[in-house]
Image (cartoon, grey):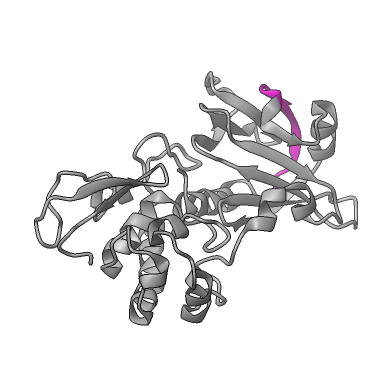
Amino acid sequence: MPELPEVETVRRGLNQLTLNQKITGGDVLLHRTLAHPFSVEEFVTRIKGSVITTWHRRGKYLLAELSVSSSSSPCSILGVHLRMTGQLLWLHRDELLHKHTRIRLFFEDEHELRFIDQRTFGQMWWVPPGVAPESIITGLRKLAVDPFSPEFTVEYLARKLRNRRRPIKTALLDQSIVAGLGNIYADEALFLSGVLPQTLCTHLQPEQIERLRSCIIQVLKASIEAGGTTFSNFLNVKGVNGNYGGVAWVYNRAGEPCRVCSTAIQRTRLAGRSSHYCVQCQR
């Protein structure tokens, strides 16, 4: 948490609110949140005077292109990973400072973008112009294709799962198989596809893989439309909760009746993570 839909919700909000405004400065309140450069002074100097031209998402990473109007050089990149509890909030400079605020970016219209992170696992990077983001944000190297990419085909998923003797739920959380998918939406996609989370990848039939690929895309789209899921602390850039949690099929509903057959939803642990499923609807 946050997963792909939450990060995509944040990306869309950032593109609505932060573009084409000059960054006038910044402040790093927790040094370890700044992953690159290590010097706070250098970071603030590098971003000052830049304008955010667009935000991208790669898996669960947010990447902003920063341009300098007086320069024809390539854009630098501002990278963010929210990890477990990170939030990016667009606030007026006068708003009371939250005690878990880690980094502040100041803009010329008296607003600021605050990186708030209770558990302190989140990170921010500045990547110089002309440098591949993967060379500094090394987690990008491990990412597989995005579920919304044309490359995420049935053939691709079947090839990635072939010969893997581990539960399908565990495999879906592997970012080298599907980028951006996490615990919530893996449970939801498995329910919609009718596959038990404990099923070994090697036991999956071609028609199950085809359904699973379709359901992954279906559930991610539904959550994005709902503004993501808030079970603990996810907020969009305006500080608003996501709404998907109220309509989840199985996730976080252990003991409650299945929305399809009324059987009590079961909960188990796989590779240290909770998994929710219906013994009647999933086989």
Residue 88: x, y in percent?
A: 55, 38
Q: Nearer the viewer, residue 60 or 128?
A: 60
Q: Quadrant of the N terminus?
A: top left
Q: Is residue 84 left or right of residue 211?
A: right
Regarding residue 20, the answer to whether it shows in the image is no
Start-end of magenta stretch:
21-31
Q: Quadrant of residue 260?
A: bottom left
Q: Nearer the viewer, residue 94 or 220?
A: 220
| Residue at position x 22%, y 64% in the image | 282
Q: Is residue 15 left or right of residue 206?
A: right
| Residue at position x 54%, y 63% in the image | 177
Regarding residue 38, the answer to whether it shows in the image is yes
Residue 91: x, y in percent?
A: 55, 32
| Residue at position x 41%, y 34% in the image | 233
Above or below, 86 relative to 148: above
Q: Is residue 16 left or right of residue 260?
A: right
Residue 250: x, y in percent?
A: 25, 53
Q: Is residue 120 left or right of residue 30?
A: left
User: Please, which residue is most extreme toward the left here?
Assistant: 262
Q: Quadrant of the C terminus?
A: bottom left
Above or below, 35 relative to 156: above
Residue 149: x, y in percent?
A: 55, 72
Q: Is residue 72 magenta?
A: no
